[in-house]
Image (spheres, grey):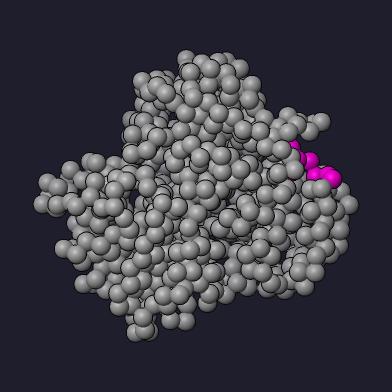
Amino acid sequence: MCGICGELRFDGQVPDETALKSMTNRLARRGPDASGQYLSGPVAFGHRRLSVIDLSERSSQPMVDATLGLVLVFNGTIYNYPELREQLGAKGYSFFSDGDSEVILKAWAEWGEDCPQHLQGMFAFAIWDISKQRLFLARDRFGIKPLYYSITPGGVRFASTSQALLAAGDVDDAIDPVALHHHLSLHAVVPAPRTLLRGLRKLRPGHSLTFGVRGQSSLKRYWQLTASPCLEEMNEWEWIEATHEALKRAVERRRTIADVPVGVLLSGGLDSSLLVALLAEAGNSNIMTFSVGFEDQPEEKGHEFEYSDLVADLYGTRHQRFIIPNEEVLARLPEAVDNMAEPMVGQDAVAFYLLGERVSREVKVVQSGQGADEVFAGYFWYSQMQAAAGSDIERFRPLYFDRSHEELEQLVTPAYHGPDYTTPRVAQGLAEVGAKRFLNRVLGYDVTTLIVDDPVKRVDNMTMAWGLEARVPFLDQELVELVACMPPEVKLRSGGKHPLKVIARDLLPEVVVDRPKGYFPVPSLKFVRGEVLEFMRDVLDSRACRERGLFQRPYVEQLLDRPEQAHTPILGNKLWHLALLEFWLQRNTGKPT
């Protein structure tokens, strides 16, 4: 829901209105319904609205509460806002709108910097406190909603996308060597606060950041997933029942907190199929579902309609499926890349982009199954890590990192050489989770750090490019905190995601529950040949790529000679990684660094 941006000056000057307009205009696709701005003294806010809750002008933004002396721009949805509204009303606050945005303002007035602790949902927001002359930024616990910022010569700017900040100017777009090491080790994940560009930063999930008018700042962590053992031991069936109840609440809450219809992105896999089943179990009828497919390749089908159709027929959903011609995938790839706040190497990004285009013509809000594999240990590498020996990082690194530090130095030119930045960063992240069991530390780090940049960011960027809000019930705070305590062996049974499979057996056809783990199929990109190979060759052989001097040519030539053989431990294509990175840099920075 929406795109936000703004600027606070530290030098006594007024914000650059032209820069504000540039940022706001660049966010138009995230909020196609309305536009607004606020300028006063050292601060300026811009907003693009996607109307989902309280569709009236009373919830327009930037939202100004003259009585409290507060101004807000907000992106996301607060799922417990009705309860908070009642609680704050009992404390004497009166409301002039019916949506969740105003509740954030009252929460700030009541609890100050502790207000994010009271919010359940997905959010990124900025509050300007007029009397205290402070800018407060906050981001949700799992980073579902993005929030980027840059320190400029005169102050700080923030926005929902990196492209908005780049459009405003004054961003150092040289490549950050530390971030590059992360990007090339963790399949394009760069843990916050870094991004690939030196002058661009992102707020960490579960954190707030406060700025004063003289440039003073303070970063505060308001939430941390500790994955502590539960006080009361439960047996397997009690765990499954508790999971079922928590998941039902998460799914239903994401349906009811909206003043517009809510659909489901139905891939045909277990996760999205279970969302449909749980909605029906809760008594919902007239469910809208959407599936996308591509043309087949000799080695692989381009769709999973045989599964999604079963679920749609079983529950009588209003189902639509879309077939994307192969030639459209490559032709539309530049559009998808232009809407990536950071380079994303998941080949299904373009699938979500093209699906979002079609679904946005029907609804404004959908539920999506992202996060289930990371919460419930659904990927093949989790069981392999569990069976491995050694320290946490010794068990994690060989099964997850795209390449060793030594190979990375063969890939990038000496200007980007340095120590192994990624291994200690991941080791520290695993230790911070604080769980007693190794796999729970891995899953906790994954769900709070790694999936923030992929797949959570991928889904947000690609759907919001069409003004479509994607909600992710499997990243519900209550559900994640519960499952973080669950013994790993319960999650790993049945080949992973055991609790979900048990819940689904009473709700879904066996063929959907027991099917092998699937991935969003985009065969025309997965199999590197023909026009796709020529596209990557053109990008990596381009003058811009050579002048950038990022990659060592012998490594690139080696990959081009065997494009379908060079894979990462989790089966990513190394050639695609390099081509996508270079293509993103060309599209978004427009010059060698």
In this view, the residue in front, 53 or 559, is: 53
Q: Residue 88 versus residue 484: which sits nearer the camera?
A: 88
Residue 68 percent location from the top left of the image: 18, 63
Examine the rendered structure and indicate whether residue 502 appears above or below residue 485: above
Residue 470 among magenta residues: no
| Residue 549: quadrant of the picture | bottom right
Answer above or below: position of 289 versus 9. Answer: above
Dividing the picture into quadrants, the one containing residue 166 is bottom right
User: Is residue 247 placed above or below 557 in the rendered structure?
Assistant: above
* 61 on left or right of 330: left
Residue drawn at point x = 53 percent, y = 51 percent? 465
Q: Say left or right for 150 vs 353.
A: left
Q: Main secondary structure of the magenta part?
A: helix
Q: Position of residue 539 (x, y in %)?
A: 77, 60
The stretch in magenta equals 523-530
Where is residue 505 shown, x and y percent of the image? 50, 16
Residue in view at x 42 percent, y 77 percent: 16
Residue 483, by quadrant, is: top left
| Residue 527 is a magenta residue | yes
Residue closer to the observer: 184 or 123: 123
Find the residue positioned furthest to the right.
561
| Residue 316, above or below 369 | above
Taking 553 as reference, is 73 left or right? left
Name the residue rendered at 55%, 42% in the picture: 356
The reply to whether residue 198 is in sight is yes
- At x 46%, y 33%, the residue is 263
